[in-house]
Image: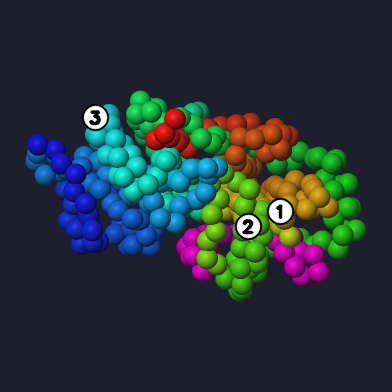
Amino acid sequence: MQQFVLTETPQQLTSISAVTSLPAVDPDVLVRHKADSHWALIDHEGSTIGHCSLWWHNTPPYRNHRIGVIGHYAVSDRSAARQVLQHACEELAANGCTMAVGPMDGNTWRQYRLVTEFGAEPPFFLEPNSPEDWPGHFVENGFKPLAEYFSALNTDLRCHDPLLSRVENRMNGLNIRIRSLNPTHFDDDLRRIFSVATVSFRNNPLYMTIDEEDFIGLYRPLQEVVRHELVMIAERHNVPVGFIFAVPDLLQAKRGETIDTVIVKTLGVLPRREYAGLGHLLLGRARSAARELGYTRLIHALMRDVGHLRRMSGRYGRPIRRYTLFAKEFRS
């Protein structure tokens, strides 16, 4: 007989995760993510065949809904998916939520969304990589797309965009200077990036605030793998107004390949009219820096599929992957 088990302590989670073929959830991650509950579906042999975490406190705003979040999602098959998602929705509804969103590990600063169009390119560093059948789990259980995203590949880092010269002249006129990350003051520069990110991303779907130290904790593990030349901060009178954070594609090395690709993980600019075009300029600078370092490809990763980002991507590359975040309403 199958049953759901509420794992209330990291020790319980460790015990349950030991008997499973699913991706395990690190108990330390569960503690840091502060989920309101974590459920495991156990089969008659005592093996875990599905699990998820749920959040209903401190969740992102969305229109007139009270959002509940489903994250740390993993299942063995469609039958387990149906049970896990149904149970998750019942729990969220019982705790006053009117909409479930997932998969998302609490908020959009962490891992979220599923791959819905895989393409021919292999997975890249820091990319969510989910099984092909998982989007069907959500659709089959009443979820609909809430937001769409894509990644685009640029294979010609030598391309010249005449628009950038005009943008650069205008930014120079505003006393904006672009510099590389200072590797000896990594945390200090992360704080400067944080000051821009919290403003530039606040209109994104399901945005919620994050503590500065939590933000630094997300990026600090990358300190040993970043090339400081690929992380840039735009400053006006020493005040940060934009940034781009790019890293080499380390998964290529794990496949035994030469690392020839750079991943643009994050790009942000303060939303002021006078800074229009600064994002293009930062991307162009990153493209030039990557070329000078010997890289031949650049992936602009996990962009929202909206007009201005689609146009910017179209100038330099082609979509290689698409992703979806799903939602299900509990009321008409």
Residue receiving disc 2: 197
Q: Is residue 332 left or right of residue 304?
A: left
Is label 3 in a helix, a strand or a loop?
Answer: helix
**Of the numbered discs in the image, which one, if any, rests on residue 269?**
1
> Which residue sits at x=62%, y=52%?
202
The kind of residue tagged 1 is Val
**Residue situated in front as seen by the camera: 138 or 309:** 138
The kind of residue tagged 2 is Ala
Image quadrant assignment for residue 331 = top left
**Is residue 60 inside the magenta stretch?**
no
Measured in 3D between alpha carbons, the distance from the residue under mark 3 to the one under mark 1, in whole angstroms, is 44 Å
Q: How is the image coloured?
A: rainbow
- Point out the tag, 2 or 1, that comes first from the N-terminus: 2
The kind of residue tagged 3 is Ser
Q: Residues within 10 Å of mark 2 (few under 14, many from 20)?
A: many
Q: Residues within 10 Å of mark 1 (few under 14, many from 20)?
A: many
Callout 2 touching callout 3 (CB < 8 Å): no
Q: Residue 8: in sight, yes or no? A: yes
**Of the numbered discs in the image, which one, if any, rests on residue 79?**
3
Does residue 326 lie above or below 241 as drawn? above
Image quadrant assignment for residue 237 = bottom right
**Residue 48 coordinates in the image, percent (x, y):** 19, 44
> Which residue sits at x=65%, y=64%?
195
* Residue range highlighted in magenta: 213-240
Measured in 3D between alpha carbons, the distance from the residue under mark 2 to the one under mark 3, in whole angstroms, is 40 Å
**Residue 83 coordinates in the image, percent (x, y):** 25, 34
